[in-house]
Amino acid sequence: MWLVVGLGNPGRKYATTRHNVGFLVAEAIAGANRLLFQDRTDYRICRGSMGDESIVLLEPLTFMNRSGSAVKKVMDRMNIPPEKVIAIHDDLDLQTGKLRIRKTGSSGGHRGVESVIQSIASRNFARVRIGIGRDPLAATEEYVLSKFSKGETPLIRDAVERAVEAVGVIITEGVDKAMSRFN
């Protein structure tokens, strides 16, 4: 069983912001597989499959910086090891719409990923990073909570579609195949 975690912030205020691309991908996976999220106290969850593999989709509702607590809770409850976790998140250091897959590693300064690392006491989970670019004139917190421009929207739509495909490849063929195909 795989745990696919879309990182983002809950609520309409944040729904279409740069920081919520992880949620966008999780929701696109759910839609493509006709899965419906169920609300819990601190996360949204649904179960299904991709190929022959069982998946659990998770959207922590604890805000980005505390995402790890919901991830840990679901991992423990469903006995999912870190090696079967995929975290999907935004990345300031990648050009808008660019995709990068990693097998393991540090948080790269991403507080949601850092929260997951701290909570599960492991760096050994896959990451699907989606570039949101960087505005040197804007404060980081302001920028990640801003909406995409009209020109960026098609790039993000395409990135979300590719990320859905990449998650499927990770699950059915492995992280290495996904890295060679999408990086």
Image (tube, grey):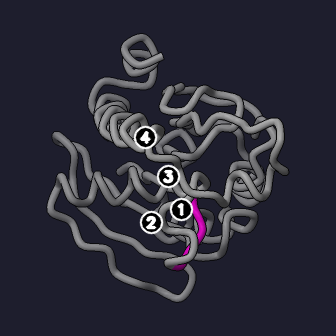
* Circle nearer the viewer, 4 or 1: 4
Residue 147 picture quarter: bottom right
Rendered residue at 42%/44% (across/down): 153
* Circle nearer the viewer, 2 or 4: 4
Foreground pick, 62 / 149: 149
Main SS of the magenta part reads: loop
Q: Which residue is mark 1?
A: 75
Residue 156, numbered label: 4
Q: Which residue is mark 2?
A: 78
Label 4 close to label 3 by CB (< 8 Å): no
Rendered residue at 75%/63% (across/down): 65
Q: Mark 1 and mark 2: span between their CA atoms? A: 5 Å
SS for callout 3: helix
* Circle nearer the viewer, 2 or 3: 3
Q: Amino acid at mark 1?
A: Met
Label located before the other in sequence (3 or 1) = 3
Foreground pick, 57 / 22: 22
Count neighbours of disc 2 (C-alpha within 10 A) and say few if under 14, some if 14 to 19, many if 20 or more: few
Magenta span: 7-11
Q: Amino acid at mark 3?
A: Gly
Label located before the other in sequence (2 or 3) = 3
The answer to whether 59 is drawn above or below residue 180 in the figure is below
Residue 47 picture quarter: bottom left
Q: Which residue is mark 3?
A: 22
